[in-house]
Amino acid sequence: MGRLLRTSILLLLVAACGSGNYSAPRNLDNACSIVKQRPAYLKAMKRAERKWGVPVPVQMAIIYQESKFIGNNRTPIQYVLGVLPMGRQSSAYGYSQALDATWREYQRAEGGRGAKRDDIKDATDFMGWYMTQTREVTGVSLSDARNQYLAYHDGRNGFLRGTYKSKSWLVRIADEVAVRAVTYDAQLKSCRRR
């Protein structure tokens, strides 16, 4: 085999291993469309629902808000004086936008070292794990998308201290998450009947 051919094959293999479809599905306002395009999403969310009790529509609404279903989503880079990059807003990454430290805690407790934030199965399992702990610490129901989101965003201790109360933008977004969860729930029920 010629050197050029071996090099080409090697490059193709490396490219194939490293490429994942992290793009968002089309029509994120329609749960039926999302699960039709990405059946693995629904399978992963149902698995997390069975294991942790977090309803699929709640998971979907929070993933929508956190990453818009983009598997390798990151927070924006911040700039000094509008030009010099100084790093990202936070270490949040993946479908669930889990922070590095929280993800490591999840890996130690549940996911193992191989769990990845850009893998929908791991991301939904993480969300189930995190929200179950939120219920234990705060008493917030797993089906309460609004308050689960507030505790997800500000952390459980922040939620208990009421840090979100001084953030009108966050309260508005949490209300939107709750509405989206109800909408996704109704849509999922209707598309299952077809």
Image (cartoon, rainbow, N blue to C red):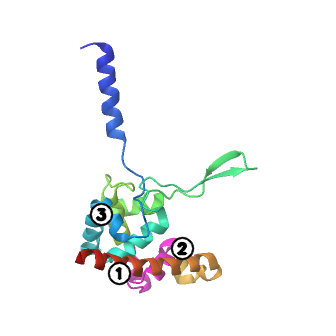
Q: Quadrant of the C terminus?
A: bottom left
| Crowd class of label 2 (few under 14; some 14 to 19; many from 20; radius 10 Å) | some
At 27% from the left and 60% from the top, the residue drawn is 40
Question: Which one is earlier in the sequence, the residue at label 3 or at label 1?
Answer: 3
**Residue 105 percent location from the top left of the image:** 40, 63
Identify the magenta region.
131-156
Which residue corresponds to mark 2? 154
Q: Is residue 108 above or below residue 160?
A: above
Disc 2 secondary structure class? helix
**Residue 92 percent location from the top left of the image:** 50, 59
Which residue corresponds to mark 1? 186
The residue type indicated by label 1 comes to Ala
Q: Residue furthest right?
A: 81
Q: Is residue 185 above or below residue 103?
A: below
Viewer-nearest of discs 2 and 3: 3
At 41% from the left and 84% from the top, the residue drawn is 144
Q: Quadrant of the N terminus?
A: top left
At 73% from the left and 50% from the top, the residue drawn is 82
The residue type indicated by label 3 comes to Lys
Q: Is residue 150 magenta?
A: yes
